[in-house]
Image (cartoon, helix red, strand yellow):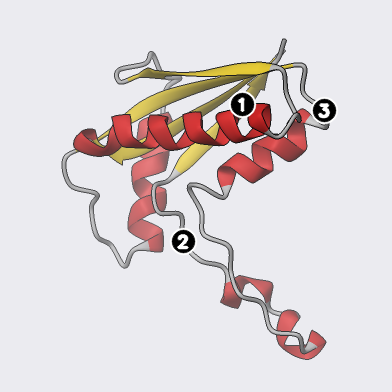
Amino acid sequence: MPVIQFDVLIPVDRATGLRDVFDRAVGRLVDGGRATGGSVTLDPQPPLADGVEQQLRATYREEHDGAELEDAAVARYRITVEGLDGSVNQLTMALSRILTPRADLPADPVLLENELAHELPATYPWAVEILR
């Protein structure tokens, strides 16, 4: 069973709340019959590969005009979904919307040529890996 693993730079006092949001999303999948079960675990101090935390901090600064994310640490969320009716990759992208708001894109194709101008920064910078 694949595991979707998000490493998220988040204020320490909000880490449990994010776990609860992921847990409700998994619950909606089960309630809607799109999965037979699932769970979410939070590791508030995971072992990280070299440079991961620095990269997430740099991403936050870059997307928030040089600001630092105060009282933040990298937390790991491991999401398992059993009996998934659909693609793990699609589920991963849907769950990433919890961390990065969807941009309102213009209908005009000319304005869409510069997609970067319409991107919104992540609420909390994150990295994801699917473990099989």
Residue on which the image places disc 1: 129
Q: Quadrant of residue 28?
A: top right
User: Is residue 81 shown left or right of residue 77?
Assistant: right
User: Marks 2 and 3, how far apart in space?
Assistant: 30 Å
> Which residue is drawn at the image coordinates 30% and 17% (left, top)?
45
Q: Secondary structure at mark 3?
A: loop
Residue on which the image places disc 3: 85
Q: Is residue 120 above or below residue 73?
A: below
Q: Secondary structure at mark 2?
A: loop
Residue on which the image places disc 2: 121
> Which residue is drawn at the image coordinates 70% and 34% (left, top)?
32
| Image mark count | 3
Q: Is residue 59 above or below residue 5?
A: below
Look at discs 2 and 3 and give the one toward the viewer: 3
Q: Secondary structure at mark 1?
A: strand
Where residue 73 appears, as percent x and y from the top left, is 27, 32
Identity, as a three-letter code, of the amino acid under mark 3:
Asp
User: Marks 2 and 1, how far apart in space?
Assistant: 20 Å
Q: Are marks 1 and 3 in contact (CB under 8 Å)?
A: no
User: Marks 1 and 3, how far apart in space?
Assistant: 20 Å
Classify mark 3: residues with Cα within 10 Å, few (<14), some (14-19) or many (20+): few
Where residue 110 appears, as percent x and y from the top left, is 78, 89
Where residue 51 appears, as percent x and y from the top left, is 41, 29
Decide which of tag 2 and tag 1 comes sooner along the chain: 2
Identity, as a three-letter code, of the amino acid under mark 1:
Glu
Where residue 64 appears, as percent x and y from the top left, is 34, 63
Q: Quadrant of the C terminus?
A: top right
Q: Are marks 2 and 3 in contact (CB under 8 Å)?
A: no
Look at discs 1 and 3 and give the one toward the viewer: 3
Identity, as a three-letter code, of the amino acid under mark 2:
Pro
